[in-house]
Amino acid sequence: MTDITIALSKGRIFEDTTPLLKSAGIIASDDPESSRKLILSTNRSNVRLIIVRATDVPTYVQYGAADLGVAGKDVLLEHGGAGLYQPLDLNIARCRLMVAVPDGFDYESAVRQGARLRVATKYVQTAREHFANKGVHVDLIKLYGSMELAPLVGLADAIVDLVSSGNTLKANHLKAVEEIVPISARLIINQAALKLKAQAIQPILDAFNETVKK
Ligand code: ATP
Ligand code: MG
């Protein structure tokens, strides 16, 4: 039987993908939260899961080290999607990519006046495109986490970050002022694998599709 490797990240992606995998008859042998294993076997001898950083999932699938993966739209926008087939919005890990500024900052008039904004973000590509489309001049500052801190210590005027409840922004005296794009996680498939391993991959895709539609 054809071997299938599925790339997932720990945390919400793994948790929200577990029921989808179950609907395809795939059950992981270990819980990545408690196990240190990076390769997990499943109840199906030909299917294994690999646990990678969320931002690395598209890379593993692009190069065929994994056949399938689950990645946030935010991660896919930054990656660019080369070599990936993205057939299905899984409607999990939903949030929004937004521009946020300190409570007292008048974003609208700063933009209207053509001010040059310093924007800190993990999402440099997506942010660059967003502000270019608006005709807003920005200096982008790449960060790897805790973006909320940047405006509080004078590193940036604004941030571009994922927002779900808004509680983290509120706790740091920031406000969301603009939505860039709604985010959810997508099933991604290596384009070559989809052709060469269609018989093994198609039933998984069908099961995910059915479960997502419900
Ligand atoms: P880490 O938090 O370990 O540094 P990460 O932020 O890359 O890594 P997660 O926090 O698990 O990993 O996020 C994985 C994906 O889940 C993100 O790419 C995004 O699509 C989505 N996501 C992130 N934060 C939220 C949130 N607060 N609510 C819903 N979905 C989210
Ligand atoms: Mg995170």
Image: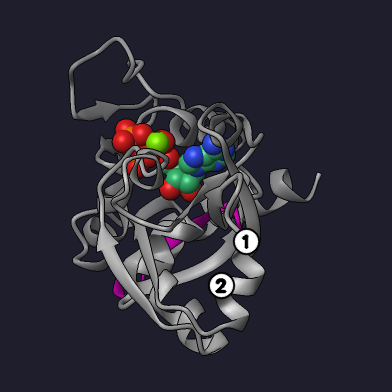
Query: Are there few (<14), some (14-19), or many (20+) residues within 10 Å of tag 2?
Result: few
In the picture of the structure, the residue carrying the numbered disc 1 is: 106
Q: Residue at x 31, y 60 (%)?
A: 58
Count of all numbered marks drawn on residues in the image: 2
- What residue is at 41 percent from the left and 83 percent from the top? 137
Q: In this orientation, does residue 7 appear?
A: no
| Magenta stretch contains residue 187 | yes
Q: Is residue 93 left or right of residue 31?
A: right
Say the numbered circle drawn on residue 110: 2
Quarter of the rendering containing residue 103: top right
Rendered-image quarter of ligand 2: top left
Task: Report the side of 64 relative to 171 (left or right).
Answer: left
What's the residue type where badge 2 is placed?
Ala
Q: Position of residue 47 (x, y in %)?
A: 33, 39
Depth order, front residue of 100/40? 100
Task: Name the one closer to the observer, 210 or 139.
Answer: 139
Is ligand 1 within 8 Å of the beta carbon of the residue shown at mark 1?
A: no
User: Where does residue 86 sit, x and y in percent of width and height?
Assistant: 49, 68
Residue at the image position 44 percent from the left and 81 percent from the top: 129
